[in-house]
Image: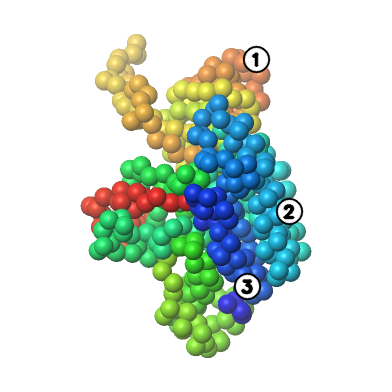
Amino acid sequence: MKGNKHLTIVIKLGSSSIIHEKTHEPLLSTLTLIVETAVRLRTDGHRVVIVSSGAIAVGLRRMDVEKKPRNQPKNLPRIQALAAIGQSRLMTLYDGLFEHLRQPIAQVLLTRNDIANRTQYQNAKNTFVELFNLGVIPIVNENDTLAVSEIRFGDNDTLSAITAAMLQADYLFLMTDVDCLYDKNPRTNPDAVPIEVVEDVTSLQADVSSVGSSLGTGGMATKLVAARLATSEGVTTVITRSSNPGNIAGIVDYCQSLKLVQARAQQDTPSRSLTPAEDDSLSNPISSLQLEAISKAPLHTRFLPDPKPIGDRSFWLLHGIAAHGTIFIDEGAHRALISKAGLLPAGIVDVEGHFVEQEAVRLVVVPTKRQPPSSVPNGHAITPLSTPAITAESEVEVGRALVNYSAGEIARIKGLQSTQIQGVLGYADSEYVAERSNVSLIKTGRPATPGLPSNKSLEDLTSIRDP
């Protein structure tokens, strides 16, 4: 839609969205429509990123291999070799299609290692910004040739969410083989009702047993995870059908027109002063095209962004880097973190894993309980706290942190006062095990989605086979 502000739009394409599952031949009709859609969005002034799977599938076709090897450690070299063979051919395919419309593209291959360091994370952002300034459409994929399990994103749904959050994108489109989410599996339930808007993706949590296609690694479950990640950083996330990529522009038009109408409705009683740009936008009449966009929106599911995004650094701490261990903390330490205090050794119950200084760890709260009062020599009774045995059921992950001490050091100072660190270790690099600026807490869920039955099982939502 011309006349809107310039938007950043990330489009994620699964392997079976662009490659035939049986023959491994590229779906040229779909690819052509995707290219046309991306160029149209660029022509309208938007910044476009494509996160594309398909390298391994293209490698299978090139080497006349019937099916992808199973994801087992012994098959990793073969899978990585197929990715190396297919990635260049996949980019050649994209380049040839975009060249017809004189649109330059760039290849960006990432692993978690590439963004685990904060400086590298910023460098990646800067590279994307410069590509946008040059009018280029970046095409992103995980670097399957080099990635091993420890540094993999796991699937391109997650990669697309992290990319969208990194770029503070306006929209993330997760293209799939269904139009949207339904309250039941539409393939087995003709009366399934579309779910058009989700305010809080955590309200869709369910026992997920589905997998992706034979070519891919994801499924509907990974798309829900991606939606949770992206919306936490303020990115509107959309699930829609990959065989109709032209719907992307229509959905963007719909969402932007809807925002304008909603802002108009609140214009008489604004909760804050409007910016000059907002004031100018609201002073213009709503066009017939905008009204048409609202009335003819393509079918999709839209996950609304969190009105209070967690922030770039917090997102990086939570999702950009892999945790190398776990620190178990008591409820008092958790409350202190919520109050913006740092993590002191006194609040640490236990430590697990092998990590060194400035590596990321999971923060897990374990319940504490009061023991019966016991007497002390002065005659006063005290009620000490104790920590029950840590079990999987009692663990609640509440965030991530970059630590000032190694796992071995934390094991020695856990439960102690900060003034005792020097005496135990012989040195004290910091009074905190983790500075508050290096801690990111997981936000609790938003209100449940209106119209979604609270007592209904949503297992069918994620039991759809998907690219």
Regarding mark 1 in the picture, which secondary structure is present there? loop
Say if residue 296 shows up in the picture.
Answer: yes
For disc 2, the marked residue is 127
Identify the colour scheme used. Answer: rainbow
Residue 214 placement (x, y as % from top left): 47, 44
The answer to whether 56 appears left or right of 183 in the picture is right
C-alpha span from label 1 to label 2: 44 Å
Q: How many other residues sit within 10 Å of disc 1, few (<14), some (14-19) or many (≥20)?
A: few
Q: Which of 217 and 308 is in front in this view?
A: 217
For disc 3, the marked residue is 40
Whether residue 56 is situated above or below residue 182 in the rendered picture: above
Say if residue 315 shows up in the picture.
Answer: no
| Quarter of the image with the N terminus in it | bottom right
Residue drawn at the location 46% of the way across and 22% of the way down: 350
Labels 3 and 2 touching (C-beta < 8 A): no
C-alpha span from label 3 to label 1: 64 Å
First of labels 3, 1 by sequence position:
3
From the viewer's perspective, is the residue at label 1 or at label 2 nearer?
A: 2
First of labels 3, 2 by sequence position:
3
- Specify the amino acid type for callout 3: Arg
Residue 146 placement (x, y as % from top left): 66, 36
First of labels 1, 2 by sequence position:
2
Q: How many labels does the image show?
A: 3
For disc 1, the marked residue is 426
Q: How many other residues sit within 10 Å of disc 2, few (<14), some (14-19) or many (≥20)?
A: few
Regarding mark 3 in the picture, which secondary structure is present there? helix
